Image: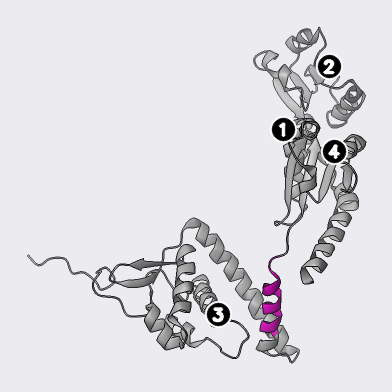
């Protein structure tokens, strides 16, 4: 019986022919542009993969073939192939040559980003042409920007009281900033213990009523911004869903928060009539807990949860930085600092 036929692409000893799109991409190298040919070659291959012109399994020319066809040094081609291989975009099969690889999930996101950038690049060149500018003019701008390197993002430190709540504040705040920025979380106790170095950050952010305390720990020379907070969207929704006939208990760590917490909860659950509140260290807290259907607890009062009776519902009275405070207090400072970094980078 005749054996199964093996195609050239499946055999390790017979390379598949170089795909025509690869040849077209190599031919697109432009020595008139102020962009190194190696950078152009990598970009052309990446965009070819991103646009679907180059498909998994398409064979690329060997280093020698590509160097001869493009008229560039083999060492340059080899370096480009190494970079593409490290990025997971191409793969080498022993005896069969180099092929476009099957893109891993992480690579797919990279390809999507390249497609988005490709469409914006096309629009940029079209706008330049309409303004009477040449492709070389645009390339010069891109080269100058690339030579400066990527702008550094800002590093912010959110300082709170309780670790979990503070991490939540930091995560929420990060949504208002650029992806390259970083927001870390630390507690006031971390600062006191020297577990975090505030000097490693551009801006320190705290709860507005803790700003003075944090400022004293941070010291002069580093801006400290105090933000007001509001109940989170999830908290508001859960409070609004409380049965008006439910027996609701509240527990807080700090006495000064009690006058704020009760009206804050009732603002979103106005029809609840049976409400009582205690501090976490009150001796009769267990009496309260045994008689409630719903416990609303302030951040930091999680120690009360194991003492709740089975079936009782627990709702954390979680806050997030006020969007208005972020926009009006923090973002103007951030943009001013970002502009300063851009000026420094330009020089």
- Classify 39 as above or below 162: below
Choose the circle earlier in sequence order: 4 or 2.
Answer: 4
Residue 55, image x, y percentages: 43, 71
Q: Earlier in the sequence, mark 4 or mark 3?
A: 3
Q: Between disc 1 and disc 2, whose residue precedes? A: 1
Question: Residue 46 or 192: which is nearer the viewer?
Answer: 192
Give left or right: position of 135 versus 78.
right
Query: Rounded to the nearest whole Å, what is the CA distance between mark 4 and mark 2?
Result: 21 Å
| Residue 231 point in image, percent of width and height | 82, 36
Residue for badge 4: 230
| Of the two numbered discs 3 and 1 in the rendering, the one whose residue sits closer to the viewer | 3
> Residue extending furthest left?
1
Badge 1 marks a residue whose secondary structure is helix
Name the element at disc 3: helix
Residue 245 pos. (x, y %):
79, 19
The region drawn magenta spans 138-150
Neighbor class of circle 4 (other Cα within 10 Å; few <14, some 14-19, many 20+) is some
Alpha carbon separation for disc pair 4 and 3: 51 Å
Q: What residue sits right under mark 2 in the picture?
A: 279
At a point 84% along the width and 58% down the height, the residue shown is 337
């Amino acid at each position: 019986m005749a054996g199964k036929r093996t195609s050239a692409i499946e055999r390790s000893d017979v390379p598949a022919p170089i795909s025509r799109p690869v040849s077209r991409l190599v031919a697109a190298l432009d020595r008139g542009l102020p962009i190194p040919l190696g950078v152009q070659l990598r970009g052309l291959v990446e965009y070819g993969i991103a646009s679907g012109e180059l498909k998994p399994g398409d064979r690329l020319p060997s280093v020698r073939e590509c160097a001869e066809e493009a008229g560039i040094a083999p060492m340059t081609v080899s370096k480009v192939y190494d970079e593409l291989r490290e990025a997971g975009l191409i793969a080498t099969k022993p005896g069969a040559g180099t092929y476009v690889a099957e893109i891993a999930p992480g690579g797919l996101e990279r390809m999507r980003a390249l497609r988005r950038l490709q469409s914006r690049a096309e629009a940029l060149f079209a706008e330049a042409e309409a303004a009477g500018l040449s492709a070389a003019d645009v390339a010069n701008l891109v080269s100058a920007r690339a030579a400066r390197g990527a702008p550094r993002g800002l590093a912010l430190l959110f300082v709170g009281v309780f670790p979990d709540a503070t991490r939540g504040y930091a995560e929420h705040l990060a949504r208002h900033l650029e992806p390259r920025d970083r927001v870390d979380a630390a507690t006031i106790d971390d600062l006191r213990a020297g577990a975090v170095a505030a000097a490693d950050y551009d801006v320190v952010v705290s709860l507005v009523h803790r700003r003075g305390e944090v400022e004293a720990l941070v010291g002069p020379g580093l801006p400290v911004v105090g933000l007001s907070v509001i109940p989170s969207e999830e908290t508001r929704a859960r409070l609004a869903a409380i049965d008006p006939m439910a027996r609701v208990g509240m527990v807080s760590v700090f006495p000064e928060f009690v006058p704020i917490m009760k009206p804050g909860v009732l603002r979103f659950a106005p029809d609840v009539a049976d409400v009582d509140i205690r501090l976490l260290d009150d001796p009769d807290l267990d009496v309260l807990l045994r008689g409630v259907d719903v416990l609303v607890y302030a951040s930091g009062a999680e120690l009360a949860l194991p003492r709740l009776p089975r079936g009782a519902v627990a709702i954390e009275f979680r806050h997030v930085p006020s969007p208005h405070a972020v926009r009006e207090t923090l973002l103007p400072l951030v943009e001013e600092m970002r502009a300063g970094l851009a000026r420094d980078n330009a020089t």
